[in-house]
Image (cartoon, rainbow, N blue to C red):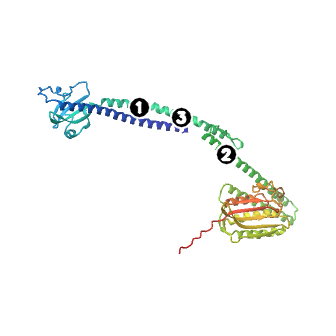
Amino acid sequence: MPLRWRLALLFALVAAVLISGVAVLFRHQLTIGMNSSLDDGLRARADAQVTRLASATPPPPSPPGAHEEQGAESHDSGSDDVAQVLALTGQVLQSSGDSRQPLASGARLQDAAREPEKFTTVIEGQQYRMLAVPARAAGRPAVVVVGTSTQIVEATAARTGKIFLTAGPPAVALVGFGAYLLAGAALRPVERLRRRLADISEHDLDARLRVPSTRDEIATLARTMNAVLDRLARALARERGFVADAGHELRTPLTTLKAELELARQPGRSREALASAVAAAAEDTDRLIRLAEDLLLLARADEGHAFLRPRRIAPHEILAAAVRSASTRAASHQVTLRLDSDEGLHLVADPDRLRQAVDNLLNNALRHSPPGGVIDVGLGHRGRSGRAVAVIEVRDHGPGFPPDLLPAVFERFRRADTARSRADGGTGLGLAIVRSIAHAHGGRVVADNPPGGGARVRLELPLPPAPSRRRDAP
């Protein structure tokens, strides 16, 4: 069901409940007010009758059939009022009508002899509101009973209910219709935003919603949607660039691999030439495997999938193993590796991913270190923003990062031009993987060109909190 209809029905239901409640309350208060007015009139009549009885002398005996003239009030056939003077035994001493049936008897009569008593009774099919008060007639205790018909109260209440029943449904319908119109007016800007948003496709990266000049929720919604579109546009641009760069990186080794295989299958090739072609093909295949694994790791990191298996480790052991593994390649490049590590430092990390990050940093440093150069690998700790971190630093003494590349050195497929050859260039994913591993551990990675030349990369990982020391009470 559309929102406009839901709001209209909700307002109509609320209006129906409110009108019903007002009708019931108004009728109740009206009935109470009219009954109170009747009670005031009954009280005035009863007081007047008691006063007349107290000041009157005993009447002479009247002939039979003349009892209708004995009361202080003469009976009017068109009147809705009744009155009687009753003895405590229930005998009718005076009556406003020709009925000799007492209007009060039994326990009610005895209670009225002590204090005023209000009650309701039915006389000849008509409801009366009665008041009985104590009095004295001819020096003897008596009870004066006066009453009046409640027909006017009932008629007024019925008329009031009929008015509410007649005017209530149109009022409810009017409220619902008004709510429908107001909801439509309020939702019209939202519908315009929806239609505009539906027209935006993946080809309209620069399309945005028009923000209304009103400073209300609709304007806030439009600004929020534009912010979402900005983020989606940036993400789509990154994905397109990632796919394009990945295709470029995959095309080169695949083309080379195809050429080597085609040369290997040509007739007349010697055994040594075939072995060389197979070795070159195997090297290209390894490069493709590494590239695919790197892309898979970055994709899992982008999607927020957990790819770490952290445990408590000693990072010194990982650095020492990485330096030993890179020593052979460093010796072939006439580069010296120096390790300065805090052996007592421990942290919670994934040892395999940390080793991968360190290997990437060492490979990057070896690729840019000149012959006879030195690569310093260090491990220490320091506080950062009130939090202790372990710092793994790899520094070479080569040409350093190009100034235009330094701000984007950790982006994917970003490399210096001199590193794009197949012989000494990587895939451009090494430092991007280092950043993903650092962020997955809750840390960060920073690159700069320190004074004295070369390039420096610092990997900072949070240290676990030190165990609290409690002193035993004596």
- Identity of the amino acid at label 3? Tyr
- Is residue 230 left or right of 158 when viewed as pictured? right
Q: Dot 3 surroundings within 10 Å: few (below 14), some, or many (20 or more)?
A: many
Q: Secondary structure at mark 3?
A: helix
Q: Position of residue 431 (x, y in %)?
A: 75, 59
- Where on the picture, by quarter, is residue 355? bottom right
Query: In the displayed image of the protein, which residue is found farthest to the bottom?
Result: 474
Q: Secondary structure at mark 2?
A: helix
Is 335 situated above or below 22? below
| Residue at x 42%, y 29% (from the top left corner) | 166
Labels 2 and 1: the sequence-earlier one? 1
- Is residue 334 left or right of 350 when viewed as pictured? right
Q: Dot 1 surroundings within 10 Å: few (below 14), some, or many (20 or more)?
A: some
Labels 1 and 3: the sequence-earlier one? 1
Q: Nearer the viewer, residue 326 or 469?
A: 469
Q: Secondary structure at mark 1?
A: helix
| Residue at x 74%, y 52% (from the top left corner) | 242
The residue that disc 3 covers is: 180
| Distance Cα–Cα, label 2 vs label 1 | 53 Å
Q: Position of residue 375 (x, y in %)?
A: 80, 66
Q: Nearer the viewer, residue 329 or 282?
A: 329
The residue that disc 2 covers is: 227
Labels 2 and 3: the sequence-earlier one? 3
- Identity of the amino acid at label 1? Phe
| Distance Cα–Cα, label 1 vs label 3 | 23 Å
The numbered mark at residue 164 is: 1
| Distance Cα–Cα, label 2 vs label 3 | 31 Å
Q: Position of residue 98 (x, y in %)?
A: 18, 27
Q: Position of residue 340 (x, y in %)?
A: 75, 70
- Where on the picture, by quarter, is residue 59? top left
